[in-house]
Structures are given as structure tokens and as C-alpha cells.
Image (spheres, helix red, strand yellow):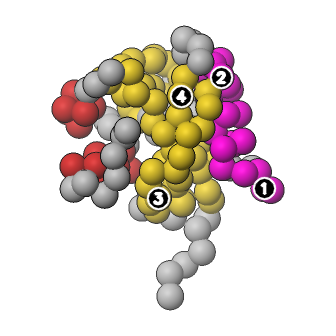
Amino acid sequence: MSEEPARRGVVAVVRRGDRLLVIRRSQTVVAPGAYCFPGGGIEPGEAEPVALEREMFEELGCRITPLRCIWRSRTPWNVDLAWWRAELHDEPVANPTEVAAVAWHSVVELAALPQLLESNHHFLAALERGEFTLD
């Protein structure tokens, strides 16, 4: 039987054409300088879509509409992640306490980024295997 997750988190997968929204983490958060999709922890009693909206506003000052959960994973650190396709309503602006930079990358560019979080590599591999689509 698998161990209960230590934490739960949400990840926003936002597409603009053939590019995906990616952040580089600030130096003051866990995994400083790492590249990843935006997202964060789910607070006790919080629904995934609500957590996703909150995290996007906290990190990037933007409003989103969560569309659907496209994939689930567990990180090597025992965090259950829900990966949600989301529609962006505002231009993202980095909150410097959490995010050092905001970028849009193709899947190929994203996979080649140095310091891409391991869970993001697993997401890209599942996408390549056809486990889900970004439509």
C-alpha cells in the first residue's frame, strides 16, 4: 500500500499557441532558481480549482479560469500534484518574493531548460506518451 502524501499541490498549465507559461523560482523559495509551471500548495479544506486561482494570483498577479484536471502525479518528495489546464485572463507579472522570471516556452524548449524541476520532466514525458492532451 502506498504511503499517504505529505502534501497536495496544484499546477497551472497555461497555453498560448504552441507555448506554455513557465516561471523561474525566486531565491527565497524551495528549489531556488528552478524552472517549473506555476502553482503551489493546497490549503486544508481548499478545492483544487480554488487553490489554483489563489496560487496564480499570489505568484503572478493574474486571474485564471481552471478548465480541467489533465494529469495527476506524485513527486519524489511525496507531494500529490494535480495538473490543471487553465485559461489566463491577465498578463502574468512576477511577484519577486516567489518568482524571479516569467517566460513562454515550447515543449521542446521547456524540456531543455537547465534546472527544470523533475516533476515537470515527468509531466512532459506523460504528454509525449499521449496520457493526456493540452487541448
Residue named by callout 1? 44
Q: Which span of residues is magenta-colored?
A: 44-63
**Relative to 105, does residue 91 appear above or below in the rendering?**
above
Q: Which mark is residue 87?
A: 4
Q: Earlier in the sequence, mark 1 or mark 4?
A: 1
- 45 drawn magenta: yes
CA distance for labels 4 and 3: 19 Å
What residue is shown at x 28% (from left), y 25% (from top)? 18
Of callouts 2 and 4, the N-terminal one: 2
Q: Position of residue 36 (x, y in %)?
A: 41, 35
Q: Which residue is mark 2?
A: 63
Q: Are marks 1 and 4 in contact (CB under 8 Å)?
A: no
Tag nearer the camera, 1 or 2: 2
Tag 2, which secondary structure?
loop
The mark closer to the camera, 1 or 3, is 3
Q: What residue is at 55 percent from the left and 23 percent from the top?
A: 88
Q: Amino acid at mark 4?
A: Glu
Residue 117 visible in the picture:
yes
